[in-house]
Image: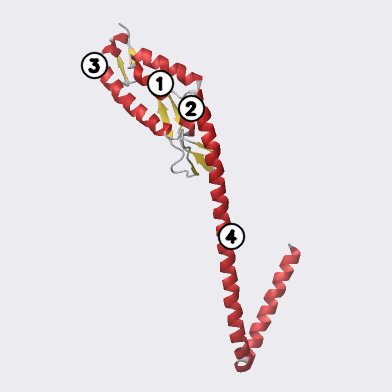
Amino acid sequence: MGAYYCAVCRQTTFDGKGHIFGKTHQSRLRVVLLKFIEKVKEARRTLKKAQVEKFDCTQHKQTFWCYCCGCEIQRNVTDGNMTVLYGGLLEHMATPEHKKNTHKFWWENKADPKFRDKVIITEEETERFKAEVAKALESFVEKEDEFIKQQAEHIRAREKHRQEVLQSLLEVCVPTMQWQYPSLWHSLLFSFKNALFLSLKNSAGG
């Protein structure tokens, strides 16, 4: 028999394709499929309730290894600003290529047929997910807009408070300085006028 490389066991065997019927291969296959199906199960939970989050480069750039297609895919979908969790995984598992490769993988490895459809996303599920993503995106944008408004209001309130404090200090300190420290007052007034002049000059030049 010729050499045969088993991607599931990650080894080359000289038993030919008879290797797939062996206890070692079937045991390893069960472990692989259980982990694989569990990860897909997590993604399936978002089919009925899509999740959109603000993009985080430390969390949302994760990849996922598809055993059926033998390739690495992006787990999420992102535009750099917001992320649809598990969008990449679900999108991949809805493709005709993945469905074809899944049937081939199950056949070649003699896997239990009852688990096969657990790693395939149907067209109906895809349409439902798209609708949920649209609603989730709309909700996310509304929350972001509200957050920006709150931040702007907070900045305005802080600036107003700063101006009020400054005005209060001027009302108290200026008369006192004019009367008690006239020379210091004139010096500060001269510096202030120069600063104001330079500021206006720079603004005109810009």
**Depth check, front residue: 4 or 93:** 93
Location of mark 3 (residue): 23
> Mark on residue 117?
1
Dot in front, 4 or 3? 4
Instruction: Check the picture and name the quadrant holding the N terminus.
Output: top left
Tags 1 and 4 touching, CB below 8 Å: no
Marked residue nearer the N-terminal end (3 or 2): 3
**Depth check, front residue: 133 or 61:** 133
Location of mark 4 (residue): 152
> Mark on residue 125?
2
Residue 183's spot in the image, x, y percent? 64, 90
Q: Name above or below for residue 171 compared with residue 18.
A: below
Q: Visible in this render: residue 67?
A: no
Q: Name above or below for residue 21 compared with residue 68.
A: above
Question: Which residue is the extreme one toward the top?
Answer: 1
Q: Visible in this render: residue 53?
A: yes
Q: Say what secondary structure mark 1 lies in.
A: helix
- The three-letter amino acid code for the residue at tag 3 is Lys
> Mark 3 packing: few (<14 Cα in 10 Å), some, or many (20+)?
few
Q: Is residue 181 left or right of residue 61?
A: right
Dot in front, 1 or 4? 1
Question: Which residue is the extreme one toward the right?
Answer: 204
- The three-letter amino acid code for the residue at tag 4 is Ala
